Image: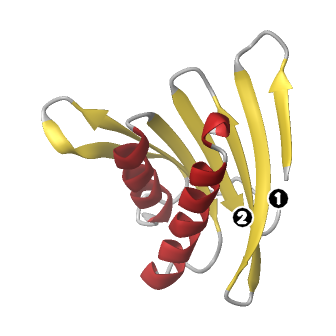
């Protein structure tokens, strides 16, 4: 686990990892003033990027794909679920081949576990 604060910016960086099933997964979180950027992957890549935020008119956060194949919804779905939990604008870059719902639930649970253990970093 690693943390860094970018001097004077209010940005907090936090790295963690976990073995989910047979795969080692790395996470990089960048807490900004009112939002969170979260990268998830096994190797350095930025193949997809999505954003989600809560809407005052609807209980379901709105989300959209910013980068990558729009038919790959793993980043947007994860961003949406984390936006609902945190009430923040969430950027997610999900860079794993496995997008099976049971595996993405393991990813989400690992992130929530880290959020519970270190709330100041998210």
Say if residue 64 shows up in the picture. no
Q: On the image, numbered disc 1 is attached to which residue? A: 44
Q: Residues within 10 Å of mark 1 (few under 14, many from 20)?
A: few
**Residue located at (69% from left, 36% from top):** 30
Instruction: State the image quarter where residue 14 is shown.
Output: top right
Q: Is residue 78 left or right of residue 114?
A: left
Q: Residues within 10 Å of mark 2 (few under 14, many from 20)?
A: some
Determine contact: label 1, label 2, CB under 8 Å.
yes
Q: Residue at x 57, y 36 (%)?
A: 36
Colouring:
secondary structure
Q: Which mark is residue 41?
A: 2
What residue sits 59% from the left and 50% below the top?
A: 115
Q: Position of residue 83 (x, y in %)?
A: 40, 44
Counting the numbered discs, the total is 2
- Percent across and percent down for residue 122 are 60, 39
Q: Secondary structure at mark 1?
A: loop
Q: Nearer the viewer, residue 67 or 113?
A: 113
Residue 30 visible in rendering = yes
In percent of width and height, residue 62 lies at 29, 43
Give the answer, above or below, for where 107 lies relative to 58.
below
Q: Under tag 2, what secondary structure?
A: strand
């Amino acid at each position: 686990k690693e943390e860094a604060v970018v001097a004077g910016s209010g940005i907090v960086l936090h790295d963690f990892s976990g073995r989910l099933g047979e795969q080692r997964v790395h996470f990089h979180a960048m807490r900004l003033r009112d939002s969170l950027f979260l990268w998830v992957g096994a190797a350095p890549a930025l193949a997809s990027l999505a954003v989600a935020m809560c809407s005052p008119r609807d209980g379901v956060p709105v989300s959209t794909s910013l980068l990558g194949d729009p038919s790959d919804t793993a980043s947007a779905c994860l961003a949406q679920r984390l936006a609902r939990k945190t009430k923040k604008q969430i950027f997610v870059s999900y860079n794993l081949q496995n997008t099976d719902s049971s595996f993405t639930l393991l990813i989400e649970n690992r992130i929530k576990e880290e959020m519970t253990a270190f709330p100041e970093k998210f």
